Amino acid sequence: MSCNNNSLLTGNRVVVVLVFLLCLVHSSESLRPLFACDPANGLTRTLRFCRVNVPVHARVQDLIGRLTLQEKIRLLVNNAAAVPRLGIGGYEWWSEALHGVSDVGPGAKFGGAFPGATSFPQVITTAASFNQSLWEDIGRVVSDEARAMYNGGVAGLTYWSPNVNILRDPRWGRGQETPGEDPVVAGKYAASYVRGLQGNGAGNRLKVAACCKHYTAYDLDNWNGVDRFHFNAKVTKQDLEDTYNVPFKSCVYEGKVASVMCSYNQVNGKPTCADENLLKNTIRGQWRLNGYIVSDCDSVDVFFNQQHYTTTPEEAAAASIKAGLDLDCGPFLAIFTEGAVKKGLLTENDVNLALANTITVQMRLGMFDGNLGPYANLGPRDVCTPAHQHLALEAAHQGMVLLKNSGRSLPLSPRRHRTVAVIGPNSDVTETMIGNYAGKACAYTTPLQGISRYAKTIHQEGCAGVACAGNQGFGAAEAAARQADATVLVMGLDQSIEAETRDRTGLLLPGYQQNLVTRVAQASRGPVILVLMSGGPVDASFATNDPRVAAIIWAGYPGQAGGAAIADIIFGAANPGGKLPMTWYPQEYVTKLPMTIMAMRASGNYPGRTYRFYKGPVVFPFGFGLSYTTFTHSLAQNPLAQLSVSPYKLNTAIFNSSSTSIKVSHTNCGTFPKMPLHVEVSNTGEFDGTHTVFVFAEPPENGIKGLGVNKQLVAFEKVHVKAGSKRTVQVDIEACKHLGVVDEHGMRRIPMGEHKLHIGEIKHTILVQPQL
């Protein structure tokens, strides 16, 4: 068909429109890669691995059986080579979609018909919403746009996201990528986002293939001369079981993720990508991963050349594949696997097993089905849609946390606050708002632009960049504050302070930022609102204690619509409902605390990590967040107050009337009744608002050695309640899942005794006792 201008100018108006639409379709299809089993591909259309009515496992084995050893080996790396004789094109496995389709990896590229994609708030910000349906909705939108870009030939279908590591230390530069410090929250986030990305799983099919990373105990990049490539994380069985591995297990069990990525670091002296117990035995054996295991980029090279784990490169290749690694991000396995086979360190069948896992995922994605499937018609019109961009704005609204609001200074009134001074190094930023592992945003609304929609603005940066190395701009900032009815200071961090390969040394605002806030607050004639952009927590004690700072908002890295969301919160168009997904510590907490100590529990002078184990002073606690309205809780019905448990088989060697606990593995968990909690949430204020119902469990102190848990989150639910109204939220408590703890041997147990549930201001006790 000809699509030149002459053809479009001939005929009547209807014909012109039809021809134009056909040209659009033709142009979109011309961008698509030639599928391995495309009907137009005469090389493969008659082969068994191309027959969609043949079971996937049989198609996979047929394809592997047609490959030579050399062809197989070139498929073990992220930039998998083409197999021209079978009509199979090359494929780039590495794409990223942490909070929107990203061009960080080589698998996705922006330009032409796809100039950008919807850039949602950074994960730590979205986590603050504590809204599982929102997390899944974001994943669904991201996968729509990913599929559209794949159809356009500019992206792959395998996305190495999300990052579900635990934010153990507040200085970690990549904490921004994670759902925070709580393993239950991280696990729920992982499962929700993965479901959104991968689709509903009907027929074992995948919309895109997600990947939970970085397994495991990875939360140090570059601190005090120790980097991730050389770090040996010394982790107890207890901490591995009840903290570090929890999100990954949830990702595989509940999210049905198609991939897990092993990390750079060693765990207890072994590289994770060469640890058979962690990979083959745990991920694939215990958790039953239906997918592939991939290395972080160049991890195999790192454990050979930098950690010196093996003597020869062939031994490194063999160690990783035999441990359960299926795909190498990097060239190492392509170079050294054949030598490992020739030396008898590996068999060709070991290679086949790895390939079966990766090719199966490609089959489930429909990559060998030609241009078929429910997503085949997605294209440029499905990227950066108004609905997608509205969701990015709503996610920013829900993720922002109001930390201080003295005298109900917020929200501001457009009638009374007609002129607003907008000050600070982050007051008119764009890319800072989308954090790291981001792509090209559809469009930006900066804080200055957002506030300008509500009031006349006077803008001063105050200092150049977040480093804020001097005070040359302070005078102009003070003058602006004197002229305005209100002042908004947008301060905080960016990727020059916290990022991959860049951990912080402390928790204070960089440079002269604190001085700028204090001086502007003193000069301002109206209320002063401090907005903090950051991934990790900041010691903002100076501002919480300064009566001239009326309000503090943590915006995280709020995404492409961040400025609009900040303004909506400040002027009351949106009511803040976010809660902190991590503890905000004082600077003193990290002064003498090495990042290299992985222990979660407090011991001696060691203070412990996160709200679950740390009992010292905080700036703001985990789960903290204010609203423009007020909420109260009550239990709508009398919940269960007593539970009797018994093992599978009565065995006095493992359980008797004086037992302090019972192993979950010895318990028939399915026989225990669920204990419903009906929590009535009342909005007693003047604004409609959203509220997060947190249910924490405090286990009894009954002699389980090394327990050390203050309390732990077992469930959370987001609820929207209109002013003056009530809503009832049901949370089902399950003994094995919610009342269990982990002992020092890494075994899950249910302690006997009084378990205290904390729901806001309510405490409810459940007595768990043995039944013989």
Image (cartoon, helix red, strand yellow):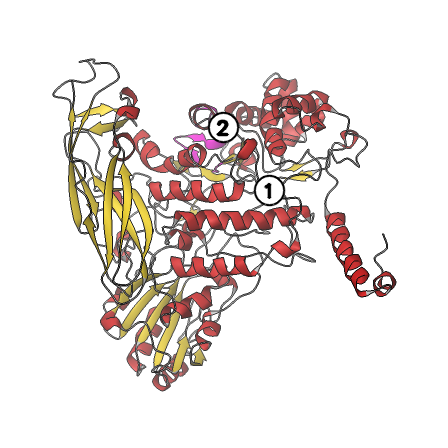
Residue 111 % position (x, y): 67, 57
User: Total marks drawn?
Assistant: 2
For image coordinates 45% across by 23% down, the residue present is 285
Which is nearer the eye, 330 or 35? 35
Task: Say which element carries label 2.
Answer: helix
Please state the extent of the stretch shown in magenta in the rendering: 261-281
Task: Say which element carries label 1.
Answer: loop
Type of the residue with mark 2: Ala
Residue 94 numbered tag: 1
Residue 186 % position (x, y): 38, 43
Residue 478 % position (x, y): 36, 82
Query: Residue 606's image quarter?
Result: top left
Mark 1 vs 2, N-terminal side: 1
For image coordinates 53% across by 54% down, the residue present is 438
Image quadrant in which the C terminus is located:
top left
Q: Is residue 3 magenta?
A: no
Residue 670 numbered tag: none
Query: Residue 113's image quarter?
Result: bottom right
Q: Using residue 580 as the reference point, say whether residue 334 is left or right of it.
A: right
Type of the residue with mark 1: Trp
- Tell which residue pokes out farthest to the bottom in this image: 483
Q: Is residue 206 visible?
A: yes
Residue 503 % position (x, y): 41, 52
Q: CA distance from mark 1 to mark 2?
A: 21 Å
Q: Is residue 271 magenta?
A: yes
For image coordinates 16% across by 45% down, the residue present is 763
Which is nearer the eye, 625 or 413? 413
- Vertical relation: 294 (above or below) 502: above
1 or 2: mark nearer the eye: 1
Q: Is residue 235 visible?
A: no
- Vertical relation: 711 (above or below) 574: above
Residue 274 numbered tag: 2
